[in-house]
Image (cartoon, rainbow, N blue to C red):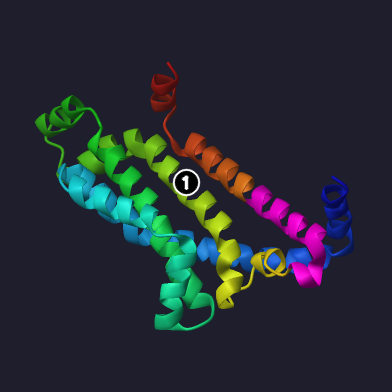
Amino acid sequence: MLTFFASFSFMTDHFGLLADRTVDHLKLSAAAVAVSLVLALPLGVWLGHRGKGSFLTVSISNIGRALPSLALIAIFLGLLGIGFVNVLTALVVMAVPPVLTHAYLSVEQVDPDLVRAGRGMGLTEWQILTRIELPLALPVLFTGIRIAAVYVISSATLAAVAGGGGLGDIILNQVSYGLSGVIAAALWVAALALAADALFGALRKRLTPRGVLAGRSG
């Protein structure tokens, strides 16, 4: 218990160190989430719109969840060497499955009667996707992004193993910073994960049409 409270003293005494490591941590995490969105969102939405690809999305999701983050970093360590790119690639591999799966399900599960009604009104496939499916898909879609963001921020602590920096430099270096330093950095990682979850939750609420939110809450 004393060590836990001592971690707050560590935060005060080493605020500059924690702030610098936090910036590195956020840069790595934001880059991984951004790359995963570019790769997984269009593919998941497209497959969901076509109503095909469930086997692909489930397979990718299962493979991504089965691979431990540390094992991925070790694999890419041999392929890409030590540094930012190695850890970024491993984090992207972990972030893609939840984004891809939720993007697919969010569009695929839209009420087919609404889609048929849109086609009956003469809407193009692009208009059906952008005007009907995506607005209704946003709540589930953002759930996948939130899961990926929290997962990446938490797993990025292992970046220190491969020279990727971040708060993991403190967490994995108890000899230099002591147990209070490890706990302090872990608390900061937890706070970052909670902040990311709250941010994407707020974006979900802000971007989702009110009628969709009301229908889901009801």
Q: Is residue 126 visible?
A: no
Residue 189 vs residue 119: left or right?
right
Is 56 situated left or right of 160 in this image?
left
Secondary structure under badge 1?
helix
Image point 43% across, 70% down: which residue? 89
Q: Which residues are magenta?
A: 174-192
Q: Position of residue 186 (x, y in %)?
A: 69, 55
Residue 132: x percent and y percent?
A: 26, 35
Is residue 43 left or right of 89 when viewed as pictured?
A: left
Relative placement, left or right, of 128 versus 64 is left
* Residue displayed at 25% across by 52% down: 59
Q: Which residue is mark 1?
A: 147
Q: Residue at x 46, y 51 (%)?
A: 148
| Residue closer to the observer: 119 or 43 | 43
Residue 29 place in picture, x, y as percent: 54, 62
Q: Is residue 176 magenta?
A: yes
